[in-house]
Image (cartoon, rainbow, N blue to C red):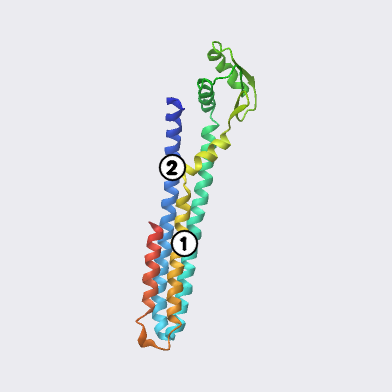
Amino acid sequence: MQTAQEKVLIKHQAIKASRYHKQLINSAKKQVAKYCQQAQSEAQAIRQMAYEQGYQDGVRQLMADMLQGIELSQRQYQQALAHSQTQLHTILIELFNDPRMYEIISHHFINLQLDAPQITMHVPTGLMNRLKPILTEIQHITVRSGAEDGIAMETGDEILHFSPTNAAQRMLPKLLPMPLRCKILGARNACYQKIAELANLTGNTDDTSSTSFRPEDISNNVNQSATKQQQ
């Protein structure tokens, strides 16, 4: 159970980290839009080339260039996500390393009122003096100097432990959920499937009257998938 002070501090830092994460994602989306626009411009020139050089060769070149554009957008977006994750992890560790956070966690452990005859807390040396006024009336809790990067409470066979690194790792998935990382993979796979279907159609060029497939069809389908990827 978190104290009111703990909730306010964590909420403030989480909002700050989330805002920074959104800025990175928006920047990545702009890069995706830029490369998609560039791919569309190149597709226009390639379509003209397709009519001049021959239907089949032109379509194949168009598909290759569109795939290259999609892969480039994919890499840019994934790099932004990876960078965002690293930055968020650093911010969270700094938050949980704050001496005030250590004090909040220590108060939280003490207020748990665990049903145990004897409890031992291991806290950083600098925190021991700040806890003494509280513990003067709590005889069954003994405070000892422990590691500088964590807090531990021993109660019977149970050990409660807090460390900034572990706390940051638990918080990170809540700020950067896995579905966000998987979304772009789904968009890419859908786009590849569309191109594969169109490539199969181009293989049946002997009977041109049996299909109305045109090079523009590739651009339209790929653009639709790219638009979903940016959303």
Pinpoint residue 140: horizontal percent, then vertical percent.
59, 14
Residue tagged 1: 73
For the point 51% across and 59% down, the residue is 75
Q: Amino acid at mark 2?
A: Ser
Which of these two is toward me, 43 or 167?
167
10 Å crowding of disc 1: few (<14), some (14-19), many (20+):
many
For the point 55% across and 31% down, the residue is 97
Asked if residue 228 is positioned above or below residue 209 in the image, the reply reads above
User: How many numbered badges does the structure rendering display?
Assistant: 2
**Picture quarter containing residue 221?**
bottom left
Furthest-bottom residue in this view: 206
User: For numbered disc 2, what is the local secondary structure?
Assistant: helix
Residue tagged 2: 18
- In what quadrant of the picture does the C terminus appear? bottom left
**Picture quarter containing residue 121?**
top right
Pinpoint residue 37: horizontal percent, then vertical percent.
39, 65
Pinpoint residue 187: horizontal percent, then vertical percent.
43, 61
Which of these two is toward me, 126 or 212?
212
Q: Which numbered marker is on residue 225?
A: none
Asked if residue 172 is positioned above or below residue 129 in the image, the reply reads below
Asked if residue 70 is positioned above or below residue 79 in the image, the reply reads below
Q: Left of 166 or right of it: where is 40?
A: left
Pinpoint residue 99: horizontal percent, then vertical percent.
54, 26
10 Å crowding of disc 2: few (<14), some (14-19), many (20+):
some
Asked if residue 134 is positioned above or below residue 206 in the image, the reply reads above
Q: Amino acid at mark 1?
A: Ser
Identify the mark nearer the N-term, 1 or 2.
2
Circles 1, 2 touching at the beta carbon (< 8 Å): no
For the point 43% across and 74% down, the residue is 197
Report the Cα–Cα distance between label 1 and label 2.
23 Å
User: For numbered disc 1, what is the local secondary structure?
Assistant: helix
